[in-house]
């Protein structure tokens, strides 16, 4: 579960756990992740990751597989939004938003699909 340190991500992690899943929680803030993990009971794993970094998604996928042995469900919830007037937005901010909102989910999918396919099951949201 990316973007799991608050809001929709935290709520979705709780819902997945209620449905019987063991959850890996990921976001930039380990403090927020630890707070969410404290509300879960099924031995959640906290995996802080910077998905704006080009290597972040592959490292996150590798860590999740290493900790769990496999990943059955990927929830791409992490997102970044700029709350600026268009005239105040610069190229670096646009690049970071695209990295988190577009590149990271695609790289996570690319990193996890092979292991999902090998097991013959998986779900990507």
Image (spheres, helix red, strand yellow):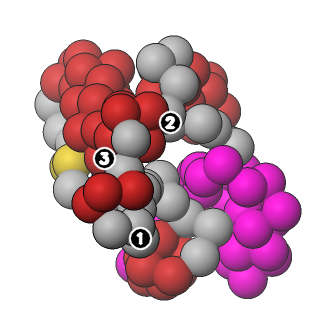
Residue 98 horizontal side relative to residue 71, left or right: left
> Label 3, on which residue?
101
Q: Secondary structure at mark 2?
A: loop
Q: Specify which label sits upstream in the sequence, 3 or 2.
A: 2
User: How many labels were placed on the picture?
Assistant: 3
Of residues 39 and 104, the one drawn nearer to the viewer in this rendering: 104
Whether residue 48 can be seen here? yes
Question: Do labels 1 and 2 touch, CB within 8 Å?
Answer: no
Q: Quadrant of residue 19?
A: bottom left
Whether residue 72 can be seen here? no
> Label 1, on which residue?
83
Q: Give the vertical position of 30 relative to 42 (above or below).
A: above
Write down the region rendered in magenta.
Answer: 18-46
Q: Specify which label sits upstream in the sequence, 1 or 3.
A: 1
Q: Specify which label sits upstream in the sequence, 1 or 2.
A: 2
Residue 51's label in the rendered image is: 2
Q: Mark 1 or mark 2: which is in front?
A: 1
Q: Quadrant of residue 125?
A: bottom left
| Residue 98: % across, % down | 29, 38
Asked whether residue 54 is drawn in magenta, I would say no
Q: Secondary structure at mark 1?
A: loop
Asked whether residue 37 is drawn in magenta, I would say yes
Could you classify mark 1 by the number of other residues whose Cα lies within 10 Å: few (under 14), some (14-19), or many (20 or more)?
A: few
Seen from this angle, which residue lies furthest front?
87
Q: Give the vertical position of 92 relative to 1 (above or below).
A: above
Q: Mark 1 or mark 3: which is in front?
A: 1
Q: Give the vertical position of 95 relative to 87 (above or below).
A: above
């Amino acid at each position: 579960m990316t973007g799991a340190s608050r809001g929709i991500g935290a709520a979705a992690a709780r819902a997945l756990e209620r449905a019987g899943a063991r959850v890996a929680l990921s976001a930039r803030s380990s403090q927020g992740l630890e707070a969410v993990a404290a509300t879960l009971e099924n031995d959640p794993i906290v995996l802080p990751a910077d998905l704006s970094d080009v290597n972040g998604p592959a490292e996150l996928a590798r860590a999740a597989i290493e900790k769990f042995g496999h990943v059955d469900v990927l929830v791409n919830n992490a997102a970044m939004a700029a709350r600026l007037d268009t005239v105040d937005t610069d190229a670096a901010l646009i690049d970071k938003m695209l990295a988190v909102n577009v590149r990271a989910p695609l790289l996570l999918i690319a990193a996890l699909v092979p292991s999902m396919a090998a097991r013959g099951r998986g779900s990507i949201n």
